[in-house]
Amino acid sequence: MASSASGRAGRGLPSPAAAAAAVLLVLAGAAPAAGCYPRVFSFGDSLADTGNYAFVYGNDSGDPALRLPYGETFFHRPTGRFSNGRIVLDFIAETLGLPFVPPYLSGRSAEDFACGANFAVGGATALSPDFFRDRGIDDMGDQVHLDMEMKWFRELLDLLCPGNLAGMCLPFFYLLRFHPPLT
């Protein structure tokens, strides 16, 4: 049985990803958002994965997210989402008037990411496998982690803003990355 921060199952604090998604949903519902944001970028684990898992571990991995009943409610086929339908990110994109956010590993060109990209992978960790190996936990393998997702993001920035277009693209992303947290 999973434990929670308060020691009572089911009554702990929400995960940071769930809290961030809730904040985004509240903000999206607070004012007409369609047309305000041209792209969505997402990082995380199975709660936000829109299909990168299949590219990292292969469609033949036998993982449940790659076969029914996952995806059957909305898509009527497995999509790599760890859900039987849409995930929170899908609803955020819809509220913003954007299409579903494609998994980063599915694209090849800037056009593939015209409305954003999802870097989340089911099972990803915030800390790198080196952190765990340094502490005697050796069974992490080459697990996807946040540093890897950020590396993919930087690669996508190079694709979306080749040569940084005379410095016009990166300041926008810099502000997003270092904006103070919402309170």
Image (tube, rainbow, N blue to C red):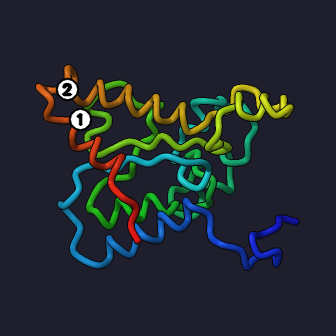
Q: Which residue is mark 1?
A: 170
Please tell me how crowded label 2 is: few (under 14), some (14-19), or many (20+) other residues with Cα within 10 Å.
some
Tell me if label 1 and label 2 are in contact, CB under 8 Å: yes
Amino acid type shown at disc 2: Asn
Quadrant in which the N terminus is drawn:
bottom right
N-terminal label among 1 and 2? 2
Q: Position of residue 167 (x, y in %)?
A: 15, 30
The numbered mark at residue 164 is 2
| 1 left or right of 80 in image | right
Please tell me how crowded label 1 is: few (under 14), some (14-19), or many (20+) other residues with Cα within 10 Å.
some
In front of the other: 79 or 183 = 183
Taking the spot 62% from the left edge, 64% from the top edge, the residue there is 15
Q: Is residue 107 above or below residue 90?
A: above
Rendering quarter of residue 166: top left
Taking the spot 57% from the left edge, 30% from the top edge, the residue there is 55
| 99 left or right of 20 in image | left
